[in-house]
Image (cartoon, rainbow, N blue to C red):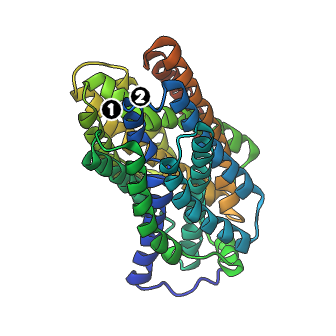
Amino acid sequence: MSHAAPAPSRLPIIKVYAGGIATQLLTIGIARFAYTPLLTVMQDQDVLSAKLSGWLGALIYVGYLLGAMILSVLRNPAIRLLLFRIGLVLAVLSTFAMGWTQNPWLWGFSRLAGGFAGAAGMLLAAEFILIWLTRNDLRPDLGPHYVGLGIGICLSGVVALALGNDMPWQDQWLVFGTLSVVLLPFAWGLTPSPDGATRKASANSHHSYAPATKLWFWVFGAGYLTAGWGYAVGATFSVDILTGLIGSNNAAVIIWIVLGLATAAGAIFGSVAARAFGIQRVLVVCMAGQTLSLAGYALSFGTIIPFIAAVLFGACFMAVVSLSLMLTGLKTPQNPGAGMARMTLLYGMGQIIGPATTGWLVAAHGTYLIALAAAVALMILGTGLTLWANKIE
């Protein structure tokens, strides 16, 4: 028998989602995504090579993966809350650190810390919100939470566009660091805290999803790994790819901002579509859409196709992430955070290998075409694996 508390009024719900959005803005939008528009600025100012940019991008995902590994085995709510707050602080410090040094090793440690902060924002905040919603007998919906990721992409692009290419790259990082300080108290204070009672209520809640089997987990997770590769290539190198296609960094940053708006819309679209058609069906469509978007990045036909590709990429990758994590959480009700973390380990493998391989291929061949072709091929495979997982269900 469920012992859910009476449903809260609208104001607490708004506060909880606002905390999630602030967390996404801080740990993903700034600590993670500020690197994407500033990557081109740092290359233009001759402080960052293509190969080093790829390795720094990969280190972000190494940090993310380390965070997910830790979260996949830790069950104590107090320790998970502590790690969440450590991640918030690291998001601020890692952003400032990029502007405080020109040492590639320290940049690497900074991106590693930023990746860990991203795990705190993407996984722990989602876990805390999902448990809070279940505890209060509300529909489990992470769509509004992940809107913050799209807004964060917009924020990184708008700030980078406003600062321009002429402003020293160090100062641009410090501006982003200042913004992170502003967001910190909102992410810290509004995101709900976990406790034993909320976890028990979550485990006892009723939903229509069968518990995850080992076969389902590995088939679905393998498909999610390919999505991680495709996401990492598209997200890390979008501005640089679009600059090469369009010939204008400002135009590319504007498209990056549009991508952010599409990402925010994708989180809501995924939530609404899942209600009407089911999570699994919507996931397959969005995996296919992410595949098409990466193919669009490989086509150099003016600005229209890259623009459409960026919009499609933003909407589809966000829907894939939000729905995959929510589905995993619902199928592992005893400990949804650990289930989401384990799935993220597989996603993170693609996120690490993708940027490093892309940077190496670009340095070797002078073009993104081969790297994009590899990402498209893997995404086609991943879409098929997601279909297979649906049949297992």
Identity of the residue drawn at 72% across and 50% down: 69
Q: Which numbered disc covers residue 294?
A: 2
Q: CA distance from mark 1 to mark 2?
A: 7 Å
Q: Quadrant of the N terminus?
A: bottom right
Identity of the residue drawn at 25% across and 24% down: 247
The number of discs equals: 2
Amino acid carrying label 2: it is Leu
Residue 350 position, x and y percent, is 60, 34
**Taking 191 as reference, is 251 left or right?**
left
Residue 118 position, x and y percent, is 56, 54
Identity of the residue drawn at 56% across and 37% down: 56
Asked if disc 1 and disc 2 are in contact, CB closer than 8 Å, the reply is yes
Residue 61 position, x and y percent, is 60, 42
Query: Is residue 289 something one can see in this rendering?
Result: no
Q: Is residue 310 above or below residue 358?
A: below
Q: Earlier in the sequence, mark 1 or mark 2?
A: 2
Nearer to the camera, 96 or 235: 96
Nearer to the camera, 149 or 246: 246
Q: Is residue 327 above or below residue 37?
A: below
Q: Secondary structure at mark 2?
A: helix
Question: Residue under circle 1?
Answer: 309
Amino acid carrying label 1: it is Ala
Circle 1: is it few (<14), some (14-19), or many (20+) Cα within 10 Å?
Answer: many
**Taking 132 as reference, is 201 left or right?**
right
Q: Secondary structure at mark 1?
A: helix
Circle 2: is it few (<14), some (14-19), or many (20+) Cα within 10 Å?
Answer: many
